[in-house]
Amino acid sequence: MHAGYDPPGAAQPPHDLPDALALPLASGAPHWYWLGGRPALDFVNTRRERWRRDVETLVTPRDLVTWLRAAGLLTAPDVCAGARELAAAIALREAIDAAVAAAVAGAPIPPAALAAIDGWLHETAPRPHLAIGPDGAPQLAERAGEDPLRAAIGVVALDAARALGEPAERARLRICAGVRCSARFYDRSRPATRRWCSMRTCGNAAKARRHRVRASTSVPSPLPEVRT
Ligand SMILES: [Zn+2]
């Protein structure tokens, strides 16, 4: 699923959340970011600054529908969600995160998290349907999804299941090393050595910090440095 995953509605906001932020947010939509590299991780990243301000960006049921559309997982028109669907989706998100955090730490995946993800997978299965076609002959088709919202959430769960259930995929799950960032991401780099969700943001900030530390601790040289 992640191959070619390019969320159509993915406008990248500034990487860091503004310092002045009235919490809880009225809607999280302006603060979604799309650096996870696969839908399950972008979904986990809708809860931002997990170890700092802990900002929930799936605030309303409408946020959930809008996020699934922005991620390209929901195309059916006129889909409504309620408080129950939002709570269920958030429970799935936290299960995925618990599993991802365990995988990143090399710890066993909590069985409850696994069961919660597994509980959504059947929502994505195609349902065959045998009916009489327009020419009067039986026709094997696919039953239309009865609940496009649950099917879309199921796709998030399936992506998480793929990321967790394949050893090579699991080994590429990461949590950004940026001090202000808690983004989860999928390391697609060939040597699988990426540490930051984005080199442009967290990677550069870390480089600048290392430079500042070096500059403040180095003893000034008595002779001008000769560059060759
Ligand atoms: Zn980051």
Image: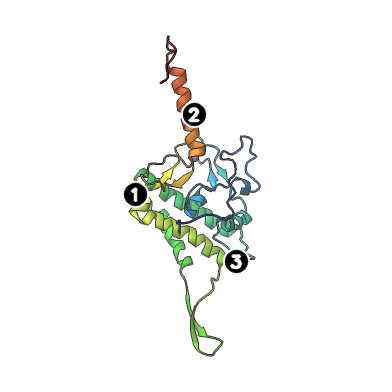
Residue 193 at x, y percent in the picture: 38, 41
Q: How many residues crowd around disc 1 within 10 Å: few (fewer than 14), some, or many (20 or more)? A: few
Quadrant of the rendered image containing residue 225? top left
For marks 1 and 3, give the CA distance.
Answer: 37 Å
Q: Nearer the viewer, mark 1 or mark 3?
A: 3
Which is more toward the observer, 86 or 151? 151
Residue 88 at x, y percent in the picture: 53, 57
For marks 2 and 3, give the CA distance.
Answer: 45 Å
Secondary structure, mark 2, is helix
| Residue under the image location 46 percent in, 25 percent down | 211
| Precedes in sequence: disc 1 or disc 3 | 3
In this image, 48 relative to 191: left or right?
right
Outermost residue to the bottom: 136
Q: Amino acid at mark 1?
A: Pro
Q: In the rendered image, which residue does mark 2 sit on?
A: 208
Q: How many residues crowd around disc 2 within 10 Å: few (fewer than 14), some, or many (20 or more)? A: few
Which is more toward the observer, 111 or 215? 215
Is residue 109 visible from the viewing direction of this image? no
Q: Quadrant of the N terminus?
A: bottom left
| Up-down relation of residue 94 to residue 218 (above or below) | below
Q: Nearer the viewer, mark 2 or mark 3?
A: 2
Residue 39 at x, y percent in the picture: 49, 54
Q: In the rendered image, which residue does mark 1 sit on?
A: 108
Quadrant of the rendered image containing residue 16? top right
| Residue under the image location 44 percent in, 12 percent down | 224
| Up-down relation of residue 161 to residue 76 (above or below) | above
Q: Amino acid at mark 2?
A: Ala
| Precedes in sequence: disc 1 or disc 2 | 1
